[in-house]
Image (tube, rainbow, N blue to C red):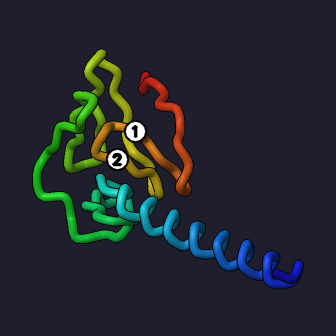
Amino acid sequence: MSKHRVVTLVAVALLAVSVLASRLLAAEMSGVMMKDGKMMMMKDGKATGPMKHEMTMGDGTKMMMDGTMKMKDGKEMHMKDGQMMMMDGKMMEGGKAMKMEKKY
């Protein structure tokens, strides 16, 4: 096989893997997000509608409809626009995980 074909096959394989990986990541993007001052439900990385009731996430964090989060250890904070909490309780902002800070 020529060197050109090998390089082309590797490039196509890498492109296919990156497309599949982005789809898998979007499928994991389910939770709640603060958008324009309102809490929205997220499914597969897309807003599906307003949050209609409080929720308890996988780590025990309670999410309120006004964006208040009450962690299992008693810490409390309020979500800002663009922040998202995944169903397992991990906070995301701009597609990246973020550290939760205590509200004083």
Quarter of the figure with residue 63? top left
75 and 23: which is toward the camera = 23
Q: Residue furthest front?
A: 1
Query: Residue at image x 36%, y 62%?
Result: 27
- Count neighbours of disc 2 (C-alpha within 10 A) and say few if under 14, some if 14 to 19, many if 20 or more: many
Q: Amino acid at mark 1?
A: Lys
Residue 90 tag number? 1
**Labels 1 & 2 near each other (Cβ < 8 A):** yes
Q: Amino acid at mark 2?
A: Met
Query: Residue at image x 28%, y 64%?
Result: 43
Q: Relative to residue 1, is residue 64 drawn left or right?
A: left
Q: Relative to residue 79, is residue 18 drawn left or right?
A: right
Q: Position of residue 18 (x, y in %)?
A: 59, 68
Q: Where 39 sits versus 97, above or below?
A: below
71 and 103: which is toward the camera = 71
Q: Where 69 sits versus 74, above or below?
A: below
23 and 104: which is toward the camera = 23
Quarter of the figure with residue 14? bottom right
Residue 5 tag number? none
Quadrant containing the N terminus is: bottom right
Residue 86 tag number? 2
Query: Residue at image x 33%, y 27%?
Result: 76
Query: Residue at image x 49%, y 69%?
Result: 20
Quadrant containing the C terminus is: top left
Q: Position of residue 84 (x, y in %)?
A: 40, 51
Q: Helix or strand or loop: what does disc 2 sit on?
A: strand
